[in-house]
Image: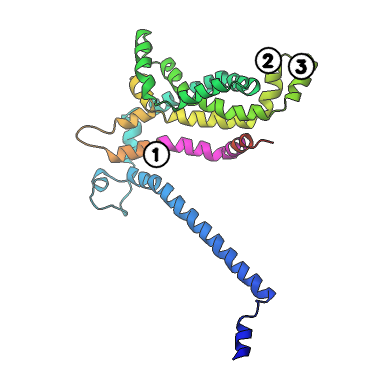
Amino acid sequence: MKQQVVKASAPLSTEQQRAQALRAKRLKTLGIYLLMAIVLIIMLFPFYWMVLTSFRNQVDNTSPIPVWFFKPTLANYQNVIARNNFLEFTWNSLVVATLATGLGLVLGLPAAYSIARFKQNGLALAILVARLTPYITYLVPWYIAFRALKLIDTYVALTLTHLIVGMPLIIWIMISFFEEVPIELEEAAFVDGASRLGAFFQIILPLSAPGIVAASILSFIFSWNQFLFSLVLSGPNTKTVPVAVFNFISYGQIDFGGLGAAAVLITLPVILLTLAIQRYIVTGLTMGAVKG
C-alpha cells in the first residue's frame, strides 16, 4: 500500500512533462483558432447574408422563414445598374472621395508636421474635438452657407464637408510618423542649405510614405461611406452611392434585393482596395504606433 502511494505521488518523467506541455499547447492553439473562427463568423455573416439577399427575389427576401436554398437571379443587379444610374452615382462617390482625400493630404500633412515639430497640443486637441463632434452639428451651418453661395449639388460642397471626416484622421495618423523622424536629419538638411519647406518635401515626406498611404486609404474609405452630408448637400448631379442605396427604401415597401445588390456594389470596391494594399495599411499603422 505504501509502495502504491509513493508511486502515485512520484514526479512525472521528462517525457511525460513534455507530452503534457505539448498537449496543453495544442489545446491552447485549438482554443485560439476556435475563438477566431467564432469572431470571423459573427463579422462575416452580415456580409454573407447581404450577398444572399442580392441574389434572391422579393418573395424569398420577405419570407418569414429564412430561405437558404433558392434559384439565384441577377435581376436585382440589372435593376440597380440599368434603371438607377448606379454607375453615375459610383463616379460621383469616386470623384468626391478622391478630391476630399487629396485636399485632406494637402492641408493635413503640413498641419500634422507643425503639431509634431512645434508641440502644438492645443491645436491637436481642437482637431480631435472637431472629429469627435457629431456630424449633424455641422450640417445646418454648412447647408445655410452653401445655399447662400449657390453650391448645393456641387462637388465643391461635398468635398469641403467630407474634409471633416478625413482630414482629422490624416492629421492624427501622421503626427506620430513625423514625431519619429529624427530632427537631426532636418538639421543636416538645413546645414546643406535646404529650407524647412525643402526639408519637409525631400526628407520628411519620403520617410513617412507608409503612413501617408495608410492615412490616404482610410480617409478615402470614410469619405466613400459618408451618408449624412451627401444626403442633404447632394442632388441629381452629385448623388453618391450611399444616398442611392437609400432610394431603395420607400414608405410602403423596401426593395431588399435591390438594397442588397447596391450594398454589395458599394462594398466590393472598398474590399478589393483593402485586400490589394492591406500590407501598406498594416505597415503604416504599426510603424506610426511604435516609438523608440
The structure residue drawn at horizontal position 59% and vertical position 91%, both measured from the top left corner, is 1
Predominant SS along the magenta part: helix
Sooner in the amino-acid sequence: mark 2 or mark 3:
3
List the residue tagged with mark 1.
264
Q: For the C terminus, which image quadrant?
A: top right
Q: Position of residue 221 (x, y in %)?
A: 48, 31
In the picture provided, is 136 more to the left or to the right than 223?
left
Q: Position of residue 253 (x, y in %)?
A: 21, 36
Does 25 sit above or below residue 224? below
Sooner in the amino-acid sequence: mark 1 or mark 3:
3
- Whether the residues at callouts 1 and 3 have beta carbons within 8 Å, the answer is no
- Residue reaching furthest to the left: 252
Asked whether residue 26 is drawn in magenta, I would say no
List the residue tagged with mark 2.
197
Instruction: Residue 161: tell me if it is visible.
Output: yes
Element carrying mark 1: helix
User: Dot 2, crowdedness within 10 Å: few (<14), some or many (≥20)?
Assistant: few
The structure residue drawn at horizontal position 43% and vertical position 37%, both measured from the top left corner, is 267
Q: Which residues fall within the magenta stretch?
A: 266-284
Does 8 sit above or below residue 249? below
In the picture provided, is 92 more to the left or to the right than 24?
left
Amino acid type at image mark 2: Leu
Q: CA distance from mark 2 to mark 3?
A: 10 Å
Q: CA distance from mark 2 to mark 1?
A: 44 Å
Does 101 sit above or below residue 51? above
- Residue reaching furthest to the front: 2
Amino acid type at image mark 1: Val
Element carrying mark 3: helix
Label annotation for residue 178: none
List the residue tagged with mark 3.
190
